[in-house]
Amino acid sequence: MFKVYDISMTVQPGMAVWGNAPAKQPELRTLNPHPPDKNGVYETELRLGVHTGTHLDAPLHMLADGDTIETISLQELVGSARVVDLTHVRDGIGRADLEPLGLVRGDWVLFKTINSETDTFEDDFIYLREDGARYLIEVGVRGIGTDALGIERSQPEYPTHRLLFRNRILIVEGLRLKEVAAGTYFMVIAPLKLSGIEAAPARALLIGS
Ligand SMILES: [Zn+2]
């Protein structure tokens, strides 16, 4: 038997959003509640930013001439992925934290950090430092998943984002990995089928034994 781990955030009012900004909260509006005779149709409208919760970023997010979200094929988002335990890391993930992991070309790597232990947005979340990004480019990983709402903070000019996007390394943000042990899983990242923009909310699953 296999086990399915849902590593996505629940999209709902009050969820953790970037910078704890109220304007970034998703909004659910009931257009049509059930009438008292219960013979109606219930309908809800959802308003959300595309970087809400678990989501896939496209290069356009940080590069003016970058590719848009529909250029990332599902083929690139489905397959083997490694969850690595970085819960000992404080502040930022650097080259020295990543070298011992034995990552190889083509890997999808998901960072499990202390970010997964809280459901709130913390200003000092664990992020990927520029030297860590450079190392992952040298290795040639396919994609990176982080359990923070962003892969980077505190670095002027956003070198981590820009380096990864320029090298066509995929970035999934907002994963929830508390319940998942380090190891290799079958991963499915399913972004909403949006087009022409810089990101898409996604459902993310890991399948293991
Ligand atoms: Zn994003």
Image (cartoon, rainbow, N blue to C red):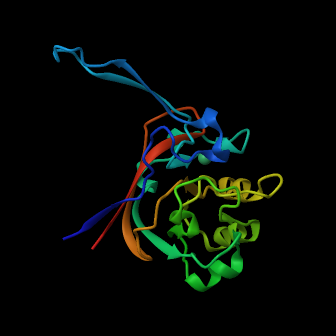
In the displayed structure, does residue 179 sit left or right of residue 95? left
Residue sitting at 26 percent across and 67 percent down? Answer: 3
At horizontal 27% and vertical 21% (from top left) the residue drawn is 42
Q: Is residue 158 left or right of residue 146?
A: right
Which of 154 and 165 lies nearest the eye of the viewer?
154
The residue lying at 59 percent from left, 58 percent from top is 148
Closest to the observer, 178 or 166 = 178
Rendering coords of residue 172 (x, y %): 54, 54
On screen, residue 94 versus residue 24, left or right, reads right
| Image quadrant occupied by the N terminus | bottom left
Rendering coords of residue 128 (x, y %):
68, 65
Above or below, 119 relative to 202: below
The quarter in which the C terminus is drawn is bottom left
Q: Nearer the viewer, residue 38 or 78?
A: 38
**Is 138 above or below relative to 125?**
below
In the image, farthest residue toward the bottom: 100
Q: Residue furthest right?
A: 156
In which quarter of the view is residue 24 placed?
A: top right
